[in-house]
Image (cartoon, helix red, strand yellow):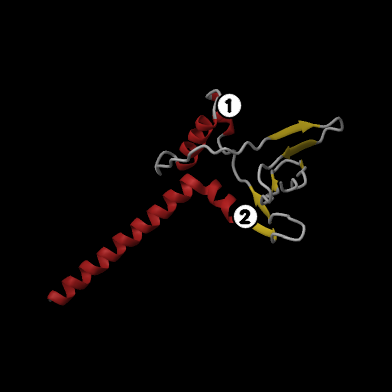
Amino acid sequence: MKHTSLSKVLKRLACVLAALVIALAVAVFALWHNELATLSSLKKLSDRNEAHRDGAVYQINFSGGYYFDDFLAQGGASTDSELISFITQSITKGIIPMNIKTSTIACSAFTADTQSGDRVFGRNYDSSRPPTPPSSTRTPARVVTPPTPPST
């Protein structure tokens, strides 16, 4: 009789644990489905080429809006620290504490509409052999990646 009650308790415990794991998985997916889809799309297209001093090339497809409307609605950011704080709070939903310090790099980026109606994107890198991450959106766009700067 003791064996039967112990067996029932263990079965119930296993069911409760399984339900908790499933509930946690559903919650993680509900909170971060866009971020998970983005991460799962990351692909390495080519290795670093030391002969040409090229960085590795990666492709990533971003899912979701990444809180840009919220960022604009709250007034943007005046400093790198404010931007980093907004991004980490938005992506982690405030659940995971993150403290990312600002760095001394100063990469820049721009977007523009051409006379023919195309939208272009360009950016520079402040390192000698940066990885190149072509990205895509759900709207037609041309991505313009400048050549890797010569090493100093």
Percent across and percent down for residue 79 are 54, 28
Where the N terminus falls, by quadrant?
Answer: bottom left
Identify the residue under disc 1.
Answer: 72
| Residue type, numbered disc 1 | Leu
In front: 114, or 129? 129
Q: Residue furthest front?
A: 152
Q: Whole-Å distance between the Cαs marked 2 and 1? A: 26 Å
Q: Do tag 2 and tag 1 residues touch (Cβ < 8 Å)? A: no
Q: Residue furthest top?
A: 75
Mark 2 residue element: loop
Q: Residues within 10 Å of mark 2 (few under 14, many from 20)?
A: some
Q: Residue at x 61, y 45 (%)?
A: 63
Q: Is residue 47 above or below residue 78?
A: below
Identify the residue under disc 2.
Answer: 41
Quarter-of-image position of residue 14: bottom left
Q: Is residue 3 above or below residue 145?
A: below
Left/right placement of residue 31 relative to residue 134 reads left
Q: Residue at x 39, y 57 (%)?
A: 22
Left/right placement of residue 80 relative to residue 48 reads left
| Residue type, numbered disc 2 | Ser
Percent across and percent down for residue 94 are 41, 38
